Structures are given as C-alpha cells and as structure tokens.
Amino acid sequence: MAKTELIDSHVSVKQCTRAQYVWLQITVKRMHPEHKIKPFKIPLKHPLIDPRVTPVCLITKDPQREYKDLLESHKIKFISRVVGITKLKGKFKSYEARRMLLKENGMFLADERVIPLLPGLLGKKWFDAKKQPIPVCLTRKDLKGELERAIESSYMHQNRGTCTSVKIGLLSHTPEKILDNMKISFPAIVKNIKGNWDNIQSLHIKTNSSISLPIWTCELGDATGGRWDGMVQSKDASEESKLDEDPASNDTDMDLEEHVPEVPVSKSKSKGTKKPLNEVVVKSVTPKEVKQKRSTEGAEKKKAKIAKGGPVKSAKSALIGKKPGRP
C-alpha cells in the first residue's frame, strides 16, 4: 500500500484535494403542491462525478446476476457495484451495513422500476447525505449512454418548501467551469419550476459550509415579475388595511349604536309589549370603582352591627361551649 503523502508531516494531501460541492439555491414565491420522488435531470458541461475515482453503485431488480451480466455484455466498466433488492433487504438490512454502503460509494443509480421501494429500504441517511438514488432505464438499447448521461448530470429534487438546492460545481473547478455549468443548467432548472421565471424570487450560490451569496433577485413591487405579482389579497386583509389607512373611521364606528335585537318580556312578570334591549344602558365599571364600592359596603355593615349592640355571633360560634343535653 502506498504511503499517504503529508504536508508538513501532518496534513493529508488526499484530504486537501477532496472537493466540496458548489450549490445553486433557488427560492420561489409560491410553494410546490406536491413532493416528487423522481428528480429532474439537470445537464452540466463539466461533470461532478468521475467514475474512475468515485465509486458508483447500481441498485437493480432481482435477480442481481442478470444485470451484472447485462453490464458485461455492454462492456460497461465504470459501475463499481451492483446490488439487488433481495441483497438490500438481507445483507444490508442492518443500520451499520447500510451506513458502510453509503460511505463507500459516491453516487447511486437505481432501476426506475424499484425507485418507489427505496425510501423505506435505505432510510433517511441517504437523503440527509444528498445521495438519493438516481433513476435510470435499464431496458434501453444504448444502456452505456443512459448510464453515462446519468453520471454526468446534476439533479433537482422538488420539495414542498420554497427553497431548493442543486449541485452545479466543485471547489476544484475553476470559476470558468462553474460559470459554464450555470449557463447550461439554468434553462433546465427554470423549465422544471412551476411558473418558470415568474415564480422565482431569488438565486444564491453557496458551498457546503459557506453563507449564501445572492446572484439574482426579483423586484420587490407588485409589477409584472415582481415579488407580489399575482398575489391575491384576502378580503379581510384589504378591509383591515383600509381601516389602518383611515384612523378617523375607527372613531366613527365607536360612536355608532350597535343594533340590539328585541327580546319578548316574560308574561309571568309583565304583560307589557316587547321592549328593546338597547333601552337598558349598562355603565362600564373599572376595577378601582369596584374596590371602592366593596370597601364602602363593608364599612356600612360594621356601623349597622354596632348600632344593634355588637356584632352578631354566627350559629357555629353559638354552639361552642354548650354542654350536651342542655337546651
């Protein structure tokens, strides 16, 4: 085994040359109504994966041996490993085995006929690592071209949120190569967004660990193509905005009398006609006034007891000290 080359006897050269991805973040104005398992293929001029360096795993239907022989018949040498559904359920059933499979391969391709089964078999780690299996058609005559195009492309996974990220380059790429990829990928990305440019709010570029740098943003007004273009304001919101704009209307509404329905008076109490409830005027009382009223009533009760010859004993206190049998 070749000895690992180190910089200053500490830092691995191989580790330094491992590239991070450059991401394009697309923010839309309106969310997508549904989540799709099958991603959209985004063409690139300069591929992100080199199968001569990065292992590529292919997940197939059963029997697994049939598809290994199919790759050999088409002289396909850039697929590192073939895994059937049965082996995925058996050999790679444990968490540790699936984790090692994920770590050992840089990209996963899968027969499009088994794509719906994979989220439950692989687990969320594949999605967290952004290594969702890419669907390919293994029944095409030009199988080699189908697999090569899948490896050379990037992919956009549509979600229900307003932000989507797409890989468009590597840190090892020159700025010119990243720009070439952006020129080719933009039309395909916009085409697969509902509403196209009218629904795109902003575009940002970032790496795995950097902040997002804006490269384009729409106008913030309600003109054609603006942030609020096509947004319908609700009736309640429009009424509230009118009230906020005209503060005098609030004072006018407070002065208007509220319509109160008439309620018939009970016959047992009175034989009079129906009286409207708005004849009774209820005066609002503040907590301070209630406290003053209670203290005044308490003082009046004390004066009444003193006038009668002292406080009246309660029934319980009168019974205390009585001997049993005495009246």
Image (cartoon, rainbow, N blue to C red):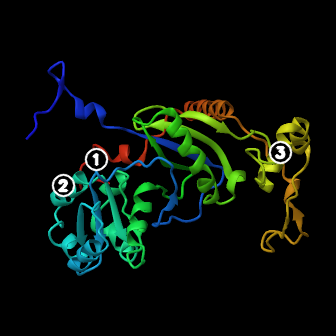
Find residue 321 and report its horizontal and vertical position in percent.
27, 43
Q: CA distance from mark 1 to mark 2?
A: 90 Å
Q: CA distance from mark 1 to mark 3?
A: 93 Å
Q: Nearer the viewer, residue 176 or 15?
A: 176
Residue named by callout 3:
223
Please rate how many residues cluster around mark 1, counting C-alpha atoms within 10 Å: few if below 14, some from 14 to 19, many from 20.
Answer: few
Q: CA distance from mark 3 to mark 2?
A: 52 Å
Q: Nearer the viewer, residue 317 or 94?
A: 94
The quarter of the rendered structure image containing the N terminus is top left
Question: Residue at coordinates 23% horizontally, 30% vertically from top-left?
Answer: 13
Find residue 234 and report its horizontal and vertical position in percent.
77, 55
What amino acid is found at the position of numbered circle 3 in the picture? Ala
Residue named by callout 2:
100
Q: Tag 1's secondary structure?
A: loop
Left or right for 107, reference 168: left
Q: Which of disc 2 and disc 3 is earlier in sequence?
A: 2
Residue 154 against residue 140 in the figure, above or below: above
Left or right for 192, reference 56: right
Question: Residue at coordinates 85% horizontally, 64% vertically from top-left?
Answer: 261
What amino acid is found at the position of numbered circle 1 in the picture? Lys
Task: Tell me whether circle 1 and circle 2 mark residues in contact (CB < 8 Å).
Answer: no
Q: Tag 2's secondary structure?
A: helix
Q: Which mark is residue 285?
A: none
Q: Residue 318 appears in which quarter of the rendering? A: top left
What amino acid is found at the position of numbered circle 2 in the picture? Met
Q: Which of disc 2 and disc 1 is earlier in sequence?
A: 2
Q: Residue 288 appears in which quarter of the rendering? A: top right
Q: Which mark is residue 322?
A: 1
Question: Residue at coordinates 35% horizontally, 38% vertically from top-left?
Answer: 19
The quarter of the rendered structure image containing the C terminus is bottom left
